């Protein structure tokens, strides 16, 4: 049986309707409000009233978190959206360009990790026989701490 959705034609929507549309718990929406990611108004009765565009903002938050962006990263991007009007396609495209570059960097780092995971990562462990070949005398460790080759240092 199909889910019945309430139709709310008003220019603002209730937190319950917003929760229903986004799949978020009301408490999560309140948390995002506390974090400064959404900014509802209050009606005469003190109830939160959200813009319909907050559906997209909250969906953007959920997707961004799935890709590993922090709430601080997300807040910085949302601050680029206009406060006095519903964001348009160009507004979202600007954010997409910025986050796209960051995602490209993450993809490259993950690809390098995947490709180098079975070889020497320059961690300085010297526990594998192969490390005598790839990292003799812990040369990678002389460049600094951590898995140097995965961090971008070249073995040569």
Image: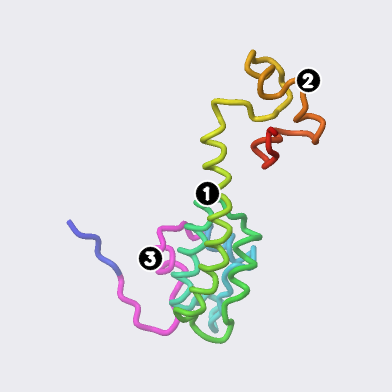
Which residue is more in the foreground, 76 or 119? Answer: 119
Q: Spatial distance from mark 1 to mark 2, Cα to Cα?
A: 31 Å
Colour pattern of the rendering: rainbow
Q: Which residue is mark 3?
A: 21
Locate residue 12, reporting x and y percent.
45, 81
Residue 151, quarter of picture:
top right
Q: Secondary structure at mark 2?
A: helix
In the image, is residue 42 above or below residue 122?
Answer: below
* Front disc: 1 or 2: 2
Locate residue 97, reporting x and y percent.
53, 68
Locate residue 144, reporting x and y percent.
80, 35
In the image, is residue 8 above or below residue 108?
Answer: below
Query: Of the numbered discs in the image, which one, if any, rests on residue 81?
Result: none
Q: In terms of sequence position, does the residue under pointer 3 or pointer 2 come before the other?
A: 3
Q: In terms of sequence position, does the residue under pointer 3 or pointer 1 come before the other?
A: 3
Q: Secondary structure at mark 1?
A: helix
- Residue at left 55%, top 48%? 108
* Front disc: 3 or 2: 2
In the image, is residue 143 above or below residue 138?
Answer: below
Query: Of the numbered discs in the image, which one, if any, rests on residue 137?
Result: 2
Q: Which residue is mark 1?
A: 107
- Residue at left 56%, top 61%? 101
Q: Give the class, few, some or many, for how many residues have Cα within 10 Å of label 1's Cα (few <14, many ≥20).
A: few
Q: Give the class, few, some or many, for how many residues have Cα within 10 Å of label 2's Cα (few <14, many ≥20).
A: few
Q: Are marks 3 and 1 in contact (CB under 8 Å)?
A: no
- Residue at left 56%, top 40%? 112
- The C terminus lies in quadrant: top right
Residue stretch in magenta: 6-26
Question: Seen from this angle, which residue lies furthest left?
Answer: 1
Q: Secondary structure at mark 3?
A: helix
């Amino acid at each position: 049986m199909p889910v019945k959705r309430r139709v709310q034609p008003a220019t603002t929507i209730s937190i319950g309707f917003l929760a229903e549309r986004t799949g978020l718990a009301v408490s999560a929406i309140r948390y995002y409000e506390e974090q400064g990611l959404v900014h509802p108004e209050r009606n005469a009765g003190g109830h939160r009233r959200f813009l319909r565009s907050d559906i997209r903002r909250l969906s953007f938050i959920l997707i961004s978190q799935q890709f590993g962006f922090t709430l601080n990263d997300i807040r910085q991007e949302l601050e680029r959206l206009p406060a006095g009007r519903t964001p348009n396609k160009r507004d979202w495209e600007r954010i997409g360009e910025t986050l796209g570059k960051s995602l490209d960097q993450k993809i490259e780092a993950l690809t390098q990790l995947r490709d180098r995971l079975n070889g020497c990562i320059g961690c300085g462990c010297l526990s594998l026989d192969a490390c005598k070949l790839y990292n003799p005398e812990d040369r990678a460790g002389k460049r600094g701490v951590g898995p140097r080759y995965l961090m971008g240092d070249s073995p040569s």
